[in-house]
Amino acid sequence: MRTIILIVWFSVSLLSCNTQTSKDRKIKRTVTEFLNAVEKNDANKYKSLIYESDLYPGVISMEKKFFNKNYNKINSIVDLKKNIQVKDTIFNTVKRQYVQYRIKNSNPDYLHKPLIITFMFYEQVGYDKIYNPGVLKNFLEWE
């Protein structure tokens, strides 16, 4: 009996580890696809990776323009594709995953607030869509 319990426990442990690894892999792939869309200035791909992007055309357009203009500068400070770290959070009592970057502006003429890029993911939506339409914070002050 003890052997059966150990086998079941071990199987559940392996399954939960594989599930977490699979989530992380999907999130990293989505963030990489998003960054590739920015590099290639592919507006359709950019929008397709954001959940309900049609509801936020102004935000999407403004942030896409900022990304296209400043991507090389941002990427020279932090290699975005190589520094994808998936973290867990609880937002409105719901567990979510996110990837976040904080990029400091080296220009002394600007405020010292960092540019914050956050990609939120929600299991109900799927890990192939970025849940928050506004991924940039402080970008108006950063430029």
Image (cartoon, helix red, strand yellow):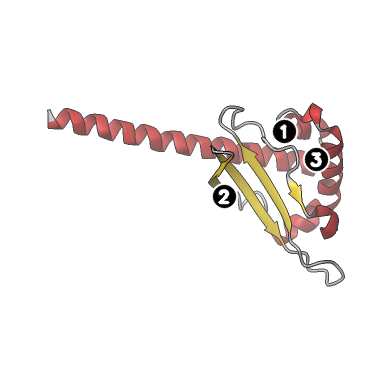
* Drawn side of residue 15 relative to residue 54, left or right: left
Count neighbours of disc 3 (C-alpha within 10 A) and say few if under 14, some if 14 to 19, many if 20 or more. few
- Marks 3/2 in contact by CB < 8 Å: the verdict is no
Residue 84 point in image, percent of width and height: 60, 49
In the displayed structure, 12 sits above or below 142; it is above
Residue 30 point in image, percent of width and height: 64, 36
Residue 109 point in image, percent of width and height: 87, 70
Q: Earlier in the sequence, mark 3 or mark 2?
A: 3
SS label for mark 1: loop
Residue at image coords 80%, 28%: 55
* Residue bearing the label numbered 2: 85
Q: Nearer the viewer, mark 1 or mark 3?
A: 1
Quadrant of the image occupied by residue 138:
bottom right
**Which labelled disc corresponds to residue 50?**
1
Residue at image coords 84%, 48%: 66
* Drawn side of residue 143 relative to residue 114, left or right: right
Q: Amino acid at mark 3?
A: Lys
**Which labelled disc corresponds to residue 40?**
3
Residue at image coords 82%, 66%: 111
Label 3 – label 2 distance at C-alpha: 23 Å
Q: Amino acid at mark 2?
A: Gln
